[in-house]
Amino acid sequence: MTPENEKMLAAAAQAFCDDKGLRFVELAGHGAFKATYRVVDSAGKTIALKVYLPGSVNERTSREIDALVALSKTGHQSLPCFLAVIAFHHAGVDFLFSAEEFLEGGSLTEFVRTQGLLDRNRLIRLALEVSSALIEVAGAHLVHRDVKPDNIVLRVDGTAVLVDFGLVRNLAQLSLTQSWLAQGPGTPLFASPEQLNNDKHIIDWRTDQFSLGVSLAFCGFGNHPYAHPGDTPDQIVARVGSRAPVHPGFVQWATSSGLTPLVKMVESWPAARYRTSSSLQVAWTSL
Amino acid sequence: MPCYHQMGDKSSNLLFEADLGAYAGAVLSPVNEDSASLAALMARMRSRRPDFEMVFDPQLYFPQSEQGQLRSWPHFPSDVDTADLGARAWWTSTNDQLAGVVNGLNPHAVCSPTVVPKAFRNDYYSLMVEVGEDLKAKVSGCSVLQSVIISLDDMTTAARAQEVASIISKSSLDRIFLVIVSDINPRRELSEVEGLKGVMRLIRLLEGGDQQVLVGFSSTDMALWKAAGATSCATGKHFNLRRFTRSRFDPPTGGSGQLPYACEESLLALLRASDVVRVQAAGAFSAATLANPYTAQILQSINDVHAWLGLGWRHYLWWFANFEARANRSSVMDALRHADRLWKDFDALPLLMEERNNDGAWVRQWLRALVEF
């Protein structure tokens, strides 16, 4: 995002807060087309206020919001609580705002950076929490498509929450990704082979399962399951895309750690992963 | 899991044979029976064996060809010659009709409708998964099997089995009715190793995802499907000779179609009358053949072709059920190794079968498929 756009969105957020009686605190983060601000309401509750860049609001945005609204209704502890979507006119421009609960615990990426790799028990808890969120996501015929440590945020009590549904795909609706694209949307290092190859016909909730498996491997094993020593991220992505086997060191670690479900989660073909979200949950629960 | 009768032309009497009681169910065909006679058959079977599972297969495989009684059934689409079979709406409408048939017949299970496509593309499989889900939502008191037709040729492509399995396993249906299409001639065995390996991988992946596979229209190749982990297999009296091909519904052409054969496990082969005598003289009957209640009858009427024909069907069906019940990767490997050695010994003697192509060559290919899949 350009500095000019950042400035424009911040001014709009400030005006929005003034208008709605909210206290603007700070910028919490931004992507290419939206910025998120920490604000506080009159009851003292901290809220994540997102503002979308004018002109960027499209079918994807409305699908993201639809997904958040649907998932919020489940009341699942590992899914964000969506509060509202509001159109707001400022300085002659129409802005779209959305408000969600603000998660104070920071991302999983930050947690691992500051606290080190997760031990077995913490990893199992994390797997159970996020996979149970994926059950809800799959049940709504949605695929998140961007599960990664940056998008797993912790509550103050340590509960993991799956956030950022900006790339969500509704399997009941027509795909917005062109078939001729070499690669589908997603963060390449955490993406499944079917995302990397834009194999749209085999994308379903198991795509998220793969990315969760890779995320868990990063947090417990400290590396990508497909990485060989000295690999660059591009080389790892190429291995995943070509459906090369996982590195034997990862399998050895997962097996010796009693975390064998991880090996199945990161199988290169969806058919070899857990077919149902409940079977994934059972696999982790039985450890 | 026990095996299933694959119902075909004039085969309903076999359901009631006391010596074929090991069959757990039947895949019913609307090609050979109209709705009234099929309902009567089902009622008779229910009264004899309440636990016998009746699976209704709508058999729309080749809808544009004339097939026996099929056009008299309500689920047979009237617009089949002009319809766009790639349109979801057409399948939704077909499912509506099929659900009506199923709710009237009340079978234990129904296979989702499907056609044999010109090309086995991913969008075909994706659509068929949607069709299966749609049917599931429309029938009550009856489970739905996801029908999956695969081409043996298509399965020779590297990783094709994994790709197809990844599409099929998107289905919420926990049972699969698998049909393998080939262009094999009658009396020949499927022996393209890469294709066999692909089918076996597909079965293994689906079963690994807790989708129980019932392989339809199978024959002695059942040994491979069971070794790959298939829950059950279905066969019919004609599948001692024929396979599921595009010409499957053609009437048998002169010659081999109506010749009698016996099934011999020690060779994993089907034998003509004179070959039965040769194998017996060589002391090579398997324990299964010696235990087969139809073996003695066959030997008694070895020169009576008409008596033989019916006995040959029964002999084969008895063996199929007997072997299917004990078939797993290890036992199939043993059976194939034994057959491979025996064919080698016969070559050395030499002991030559009546048919030139009945030389056991497929056994080696099956062994390779089993070792390598």
Image: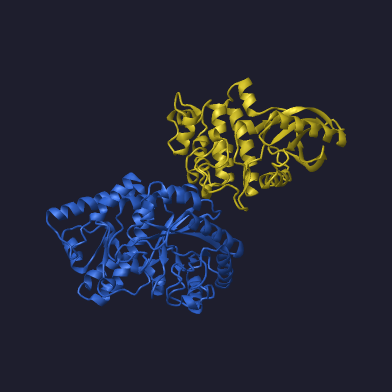
Chain colours: A yellow, B blue
Question: In this picture, is B138 found above or below A155?
Answer: below
Q: Residue at x 59, y 50 (%)?
A: A175
Q: Is residue B255 left or right of residue A142?
A: left
Q: Is residue B74 left or right of residue B298?
A: right
> Which residue is the extreme one toward the left?
B349
- The percent coordinates of residue A285 (x first, y second) are 59, 38
Q: Nearer the viewer, residue B106 or B355?
A: B355
Q: Residue at x 75, y 29 (%)?
A: A7
Q: Nearer the viewer, residue B136 or B245?
A: B245
- Visible in this render: residue B232? yes
Q: Nearer the viewer, residue B372 or B5?
A: B372
**In the rendered image, which quarter contains the C terminus of chain A?**
top right
**In the rendered image, which quarter contains the N terminus of chain A?**
top right
- Visible in this render: residue A254? no
Q: Residue at x 41, y 66 (%)?
A: B5
Q: Quadrant of residue B302?
A: bottom left
Question: In this picture, is B61 found above or below B232?
Answer: below
Q: Quadrant of residue A247?
A: top left
- The percent coordinates of residue B167 (x first, y second) are 50, 51
Q: Is residue A113 left or right of residue B312?
A: right
- The percent coordinates of residue A92 (x first, y second) are 81, 40
- The percent coordinates of residue A178 (x first, y second) are 56, 48
Q: Is residue A74 left or right of residue B368?
A: right
**What is the count of numbered marks?**
0
